[in-house]
Amino acid sequence: MIYDAIIIGRGPAGLSCAIYTTRGNLKTLVIGKADSMLFKADKIENYYGFEHPISGKELFEIGEKQALRLGAEIVEDEVVSIEKTDNFKVICVNGEYEAKTVLLSTGAPVVRAPVKKLDRFEGNGVSYCTTCDGFFYRNKKVGVLGYTDYAVHEAMELMAFTNDITLYTNGMTLNISEKLKDSVSKLKINDTKIKELDGQEKIEWIVFEDGSRDSVQGLFVAYGSASSNSFAMKMGIETEGKSIKVNDKMETNIPGLYAAGDCTGVFKQIAVAVGQGALASRQMIEWVRKKR
Amino acid sequence: MIYDAIIIGRGPAGLSCAIYTTRGNLKTLVIGKADSMLFKADKIENYYGFEHPISGKELFEIGEKQALRLGAEIVEDEVVSIEKTDNFKVICVNGEYEAKTVLLSTGAPVVRAPVKKLDRFEGNGVSYCTTCDGFFYRNKKVGVLGYTDYAVHEAMELMAFTNDITLYTNGMTLNISEKLKDSVSKLKINDTKIKELDGQEKIEWIVFEDGSRDSVQGLFVAYGSASSNSFAMKMGIETEGKSIKVNDKMETNIPGLYAAGDCTGVFKQIAVAVGQGALASRQMIEWVRKKR
């Protein structure tokens, strides 16, 4: 079954958009984990329409109930990749979905992995995109920096090029869904805390806090969840800094693909995200109407 | 006393902005009549954050309580003119106020006066701006089309140029505040319903439904409330069609003057208005900070 619209992200931008697309008669699926930045907001008092402060968690829950009531579907899953076919194929840890149009509303780019000298080797062995750079590491010894489903997904992509792959969790506990446990067994795992990266021009060593070191020829960063940025790199979406570049209609440079909310780098506020979600919906409804 | 920010309009765009400017420590005054388009919305279900539909009236009231609680002032008054001084002087029916920065959030341009052939004579004797065009009508016989305080205010401006002024209410009952009753007594009033305008190249006649006609050399339209459009014309604000032209920061072409909501002509939705209000606030706070 093909959805009309898939919305990636369950925060205010995504849900505002879903409310509109659903009312605009688009079969709409919202995909995301319940980990919106909203949850960090203990007290919101600057979003119009609430006499008294409301918690982020409360607003998150109300917004979902609102979208569900209007007919949107919401699934708890993690998107690891999006492919542009005739439509868009959205690949998650637990399933694949297809839609005519997609909104990226994945929130602010995830905080950079807390590893020293990571920046220094960016482009010199440190990569954020297996799809883009995996090919350069055929039969080489590579690492994936991460501890979640997203990291395992990236490691599996690298399997096409090399078998010598280590997952470096930087001291984090592996947090992998049942479905991917099998894949994990094909990887070496190193869960020591990293002190820093080292090398001459290119990355050569991962140095651990316990004094040990591992030699690597490449390190792919997939720390935490896949951010809009990772999708951008894989799909060739234009960015400005770490943000998705959109015009005033919330269009990215890829036809049919839109972005809204914190991932666009505009004033990071619920009010703005909600407005952008509504703006995007108008174009998405138009897009699907033309495709029908 | 000088306010930091004056916000003209009490709908979602204005109040969202006021919530931010107040929290941003700007002394903020909101001016407007309780006649937001919101009141026409019986049931709102597409604004994120409300599980069940809410009425426009309810949302209006909650939003005001929210802004008041945070420290904004709200006055019920009608703005008839804005003057650019060192700051901005906002002239209302019942008072004058001054501020360092102003937001126009007056809602959608008021519906065109329902008079036949009005467009045909625009620029040929029909004007929307006494400040711009009054001078051309020295000692001539002119009409003002309208029935509210705004129309009387416009007629008073024309008094500097001519004494032969008739207020044509087009069958509407005069709706004038006590304070302006004195001014009204200086005007001729014609409350017959208008059938159409007539003339060769320029307007020459107002033709009434009862068959009578009045000769005029100019007709100034001030029907209903002063819209953002009237301010635009008086102040030289750039427009696109009937909408105020803003950039992605909600700046107009006049430094310190911002616009948000339906008057900008963007997707006319509460969500969008609220987002624009927040965006404008950020610039206004910055503007005042620089002025201090």
Image: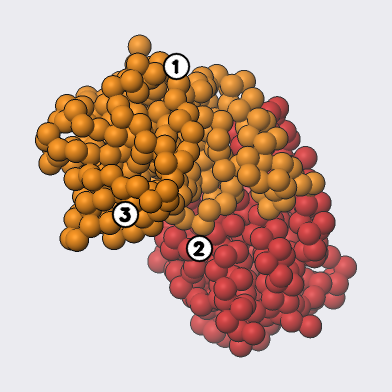
Chain colours: A red, B orange
Specify the subunit that label 2 lies on: A
Against A182, residue A195 (above or below) is above
Q: Residues within 10 Å of mark 2 (few under 14, many from 20)?
A: many
Q: Which residue is mark 2?
A: A250
Query: Percent position (x, y) of residue B88?
Result: 29, 27
Image quadrant holding the N terminus of chain B, namely top left
- The structure residue drawn at horizontal position 51% and vertical position 57%, both measured from the top left corner, is B267
Against B163, residue B144 (above or below) is below
Q: Nearer the viewer, mark 3 or mark 1?
A: 3
Left or right: residue B39 compared with residue A65: left
Cβ atoms under marks 3 and 1 closer than 8 Å = no
Left or right: residue B82 compared with residue A205: left
Cβ atoms under marks 1 and 2 closer than 8 Å = no
The kind of secondary structure element at disc 2 is loop
The kind of secondary structure element at disc 3 is strand
Q: Which residue is mark 1?
A: B178
Q: Looking at this rendering, what residue extends furthest in the top direction? A: B1
Q: Nearer the viewer, mark 1 or mark 2?
A: 1
Q: Which residue is mark 3?
A: B197
Same chain for the residues under marks 3 and 2 in the image: no
Asked if one can make out residue B11 in the rendered structure from this viewpoint, the answer is yes
Give me the C-alpha separation between circle 1 and circle 2: 49 Å
Image quadrant holding the C terminus of chain B, namely top left
Against B228, residue A151 (above or below) is below
A193 and B121: which one is in front? Answer: B121
Left or right: residue A241 compared with residue A52: left
Query: Percent position (x, y) of residue A57?
Result: 76, 41
- The structure residue drawn at horizontal position 47% and vertical position 29%, both measured from the top left corner, is B175
The kind of secondary structure element at disc 1 is helix
Lower position in the chain sequence, tag 3 or tag 1: 1
- Amino acid of disc 3: Leu
Specify the subunit that label 3 lies on: B
